[in-house]
Image: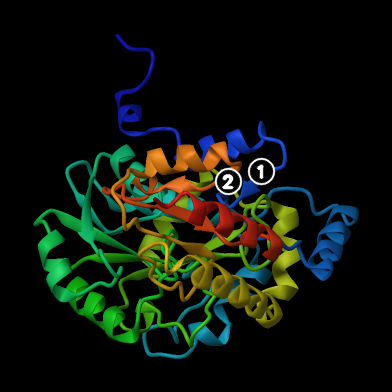
Amino acid sequence: MSRIAARMNGIDSSGIRKVFNLAAQIKDPINLSIGQPDFDVPETVKKDMIAAINAGDNRYTLTQGTAALRNAIVKLPRYQRSSNTASYNDDNIIITSGVSGGIMLALAVLVNPGDAVMMADPYFVMYPHLTRFFGAAPAFIDTYPDFTITEEKLKAAYVPNAKVIIVNSPSNPTGVTLSEAEIKTIAAFAKKHNLIVLSDEIYDAFSYDGALASIADHYPDTIILNGYSKNLAMTGLRVGYAMGPKDIIAEMIKLQQYTFVCAPSIAQKGIERHVAYDFSANCDAYRKKRDIIYDGLKDAFHLVKPTGAFYAFPQFKHKESGDEFVKRAIEKKVLVIPANVFSQRNNGFRLSFAAENATLEKGIAVLRSLVP
C-alpha cells in the first residue's frame, strides 16, 4: 500500500515553482518568469496593517471575512451595475486566502468524481490540477491560434458530464481579454447546458485597451473570483474573495471553517479602506511594459498582443519544443516558462513583463537571439 494518496498522482510540481527555485540559484538572472508585480504594497495599506497589529487585531476573523471588508467590496460600483449583481450583499461573499483559496473551495463544493470542468487552453496551471484532485476531468477549449472563444470551440470541447466552466479574463498566461461578444457567447452556452461559471478576474485592474466585460453581468450562476494580490502587490498576504449565489457561497464558508479557517486578519484590516484603490498610474506603467514586449518580440514569434494582465505567450515560428527553448534561454540567464506548463501544446513559452523596463529590454535581446 502506498504511503501517498492516489489523488496526488494527477498533480505534478508546478513548472513555475521549478523556475522560481532555479532563479534563486542563478546570479543576476533576467527573470521574466514569475507573475508578481514589481511595485510594492501602497504605503497607506502598509500603515493600516501596522496599525492593526498595534491595535491587537491579530486573532481569527469570522470565517467568511470581516463584515467591514465584505460590505466594502460588495458596494463597489462594478458589482452594482446590472440586474444580476445589484442584489449582492454580505451573504453573497466570502473572503478567501487569495484567489487560489477561492478556486480550491469552489471546486471542492461543486464537482463530484466523474464530473468535467471546462477551461480554455492555454489555462492557469492550477485549474486542471485541482480539477483532477477532486476527481473530475478537465475538458479543454482549444483557443489557438488567437486565444479567442467561439461557440464552435465551446461545442467541440463540451462533454455531457460537464458541470463547471472556468473563465479567466484577463488571462494568465496569454494576457488576452475576452470581448463582450465572447462573454455573451459563453453565458448563453453555460445557460443552455446548466453550467456553473467560475470567473477568475484577479487581473481586472490590468486592462490596457478599454473596459472589461464580466460574465457575471450576463449570467447569474457565476462565482466571481478576485482579490488584491496583484493590484496591491500583496501576493504573500493572501486576501481574495469569491462572490456569487448564496447557496454556493454558504457551502464555501462551511468548508473554509475546516481548511483555511479565515484569511489573514491583518491583511483584511489593511485593505478595508482601499478596496477602490486608484490603480491608474500603475496600469499606465504596465501598458508601456506591454508595448515594450510586444514591439520587441512580435517579429520574432507569433505573438497575440496582450490586452490585460502582465503576461505574453509567444509561439514559435520555427520547430522547437518549449522545454528545449527554455533550456537554451536559461543558459543565457533568461528565465521564462515553457508552454506545456499552461497548455496541452508546447510550441512556445510564457513570460511575465512585471519587471523593470531595462530588464525587459535585456530579455528581449536574448530571446530574439535564440530564434534560428
Residue beneath the point at 47% across and 79% down: 88
The residue carrying pointer 1 sits among few (fewer than 14), some (14 to 19) or many (20 or more) residues within 10 Å by Cα, namely: some
Residue 32: x percent and y percent? 58, 52
Residue 144: x percent and y percent? 25, 63
Q: Is residue 18 left or right of residue 181?
A: right
Residue beneath the point at 46% across and 90% down: 81
Residue beneath the point at 40% across and 83% down: 213
Whether residue 153 is situated above or below residue 33 in the rendered picture: below
In the foreground, 242 or 90: 242
Q: Report which residue position mark 2 lands on.
A: 334
Whether residue 222 is situated above or below residue 165 in the rendered picture: below
Residue beneath the point at 71% across and 67% down: 271
Q: Report which residue position mark 1 lands on.
A: 29
Q: Secondary structure at mark 1?
A: loop
The quadrant in which residue 9 appears is: top left
Do callouts 2 and 1 mark residues in contact (Cβ within 8 Å)? yes
The quadrant in which residue 14 appears is: top left
Q: For the residues marked 2 and 1, what is the alpha-carbon distance in whole angstroms? A: 6 Å
Task: Name the N-terminal-most of marks 2 and 1.
Answer: 1
The quadrant in which residue 196 appears is: bottom left
Give the amino acid at mark 1: Pro
In the foreground, 27 or 248: 27
